[in-house]
Image (tube, helix red, strand yellow):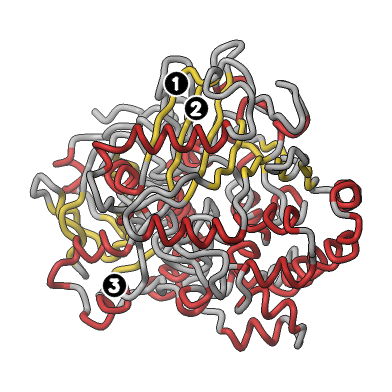
Amino acid sequence: MPTTPPSARASLGHVGLPMPIRELAAKAWDAVIVGGGHNGLACAAYLARAGKRVLVLEARDRLGGACTIEETWPGYRVSPCAYLAGLLHPLVIQELDFPAYGYHWTPALAGIFVPFDDGTSVQLWDDDERAAEEVRRLAPKDVAGFRAMQAVMKRARDGLRPSGEGDIWLERRPTREMIEDRLKGDRDAIDLVLNWSMVQYVEKFIDDERLQTAFLGQGVIGTNASPHDPGTASINFHHSSGRLGGMDGMWGYVRGGMGTVSFILADAARDSGAVIAAGAPVAKILPGQGVQLAGGELIRARVVVANADPRVTLRLLGDAADPVWRAQVEAVPQTGCTIKVSLALSELPNFKARPGTNEVHHKGQINTPLTKKEWDDYYHIAKSGELPPRLWTELYIQTSHDPSVAPPDRHLMSVFAQYVPHTFAHGDWDQRREEVGDLAIASMARYISNFPEAVVHREVLGPRDIEQKVGLTGGQIFQGEILPQYMWDRRLAYRTPMDGVYLCGAATHPGGSVMAINGRNAAMEVLETEFGAKQI
């Protein structure tokens, strides 16, 4: 007899097999989802809600992919890759009734805190007036320019991602002509979304070099490019375009850790009738037939939806991959340049510019900056296979809002940093991982008086580790670059040329981050194309 699987949320994604593989193989399925990441789980939920017989197959023992939770050290609930919510689509939250599954999100109203080498600092609140006051204190001549810079971002967001109807993220293949039409000839907004480098963006509006450097990292998050490169300002727009909690551009912390999002999606999918099997790796995708598991079993389904990244999907298709589609996939760069460091701390970081270990800046995100020259130099050093002298780091402290993820009197901090080599010119990641971890901590300690003393534990994941741990080819966190030349209608389509084969991951429109809308959009495409319906 099949046993009732545990709640994904209660088991931290360890749902196991709902029944023996041979019984899964004996059933008839309308759709098989390859990969139990958050978009695959969202896709499964929508297909199951439409009455389709859906099976999710996840290779690992734990669901969630890059958006999961692990007990890396006893008593610590670590989000090893995804760490903050901001682009999770409100429509998915509403339609799948996240609150009924215990979803709770706390906005990081403190915005971005940046200390500088000269001992000054700035706190760019998510409240425009408070942020302007901080700018006035640091660089009074830049207040008007700062306001104008924020206004361009708002106009672009309102034009492309209005609240309610008209969100371009819900379009199947939005063209550049559509984008320009939406922005109604607003040259600055068009340049922000399609053309400017991040350096051009900040230099157009503000003069103080410290304030300029406070923003530069927002244009290269997860991107193998320098902020001097054309199109990097669009990365800042992408990450600022959300409306979570009804607040423009807001990011925040999910209670229990970011993997909770995936686990809620899994429980919603199963409550709608989907079946989820973890620890069931797929060896082949057989277009029009289904999939073959690593053990040789054939799971039959008319539709296969790959949540796996497109390079992995190519590998699973083998000779069945359409050659034109193969070339399209291989033309998208997929080489990571970031590290993720998880730190268990005995106390919060004490910043020299604003001392204290329980301050308001601990509740937002924190950047340690690089100069414009350092950004460009260090990018090229890492690209050559060497380690630069220091890293840009972005810090998130989950326990500042949610102490439940760590033992009493301990803290959990996520560090997202770049640039690092994907492949070292000398040595490899196994040999140099600890050196990279030391560099990340030293880059932070430049501004923090109690580092490294406050560090109790650390885990360092480089691009190779992310590839092996999560299955993201190249350790590229967005399943392919999200610069403008790879976005919008140039993203991979949900429907592939192979019979009954679809994509639903970050390689599709509207790109990467924890959104779940890619999975919803893919489900809509499947329902319309394969079943002649649009119901959800």
Marks 1/2: CA–CA distance? 6 Å
Q: Position of residue 354 (x, y in %)?
A: 77, 30
> Image check: 293 left or right of 520?
left
Say which residue appears at 48% left-offset and 25% top-offset: 77
Secondary element at image label 1? strand
| Nearer to me, 116 or 200 | 116
Q: Are marks 1 and 2 in contact (CB under 8 Å)?
A: yes
Q: Which disc, if any, is residue 457?
A: 1
Q: Which numbered disc, 1 or 2, marks the residue that appears first in the sequence?
A: 2
Secondary element at image label 2? strand
Marks 3/1: CA–CA distance? 38 Å
- Residue at the limit of the structure toward the top, as seen here: 408
> Image check: 108 left or right of 394?
right
Say which residue appears at 63% left-offset and 58% top-offset: 216
State the quadrant of the N terminus: top left
Secondary element at image label 3? helix
- Residue at the limit of the structure toward the front, as seen here: 118
Q: Where is residue 508 in the image (x, y as percent from the top left)?
A: 44, 67
Say which residue appears at 35% left-offset and 30% top-offset: 14
Does residue 68 appear in this view? no
Label 3, on which residue? 330
Amino acid at the residue labelled 3: Glu
Does residue 78 appear in this view? yes
Disc 2 crowd rating (10 Å Cα; few below 14, some 14-19, many 20+) is: many
Amino acid at the residue labelled 2: Leu
Q: Which numbered disc, 3 or 1, marks the residue that appears first in the sequence?
A: 3
| Nearer to me, 456 or 37 | 456
Marks 3/2: CA–CA distance? 35 Å
Disc 1 crowd rating (10 Å Cα; few below 14, some 14-19, many 20+) is: few
Label 2, on which residue? 343
Amino acid at the residue labelled 1: His
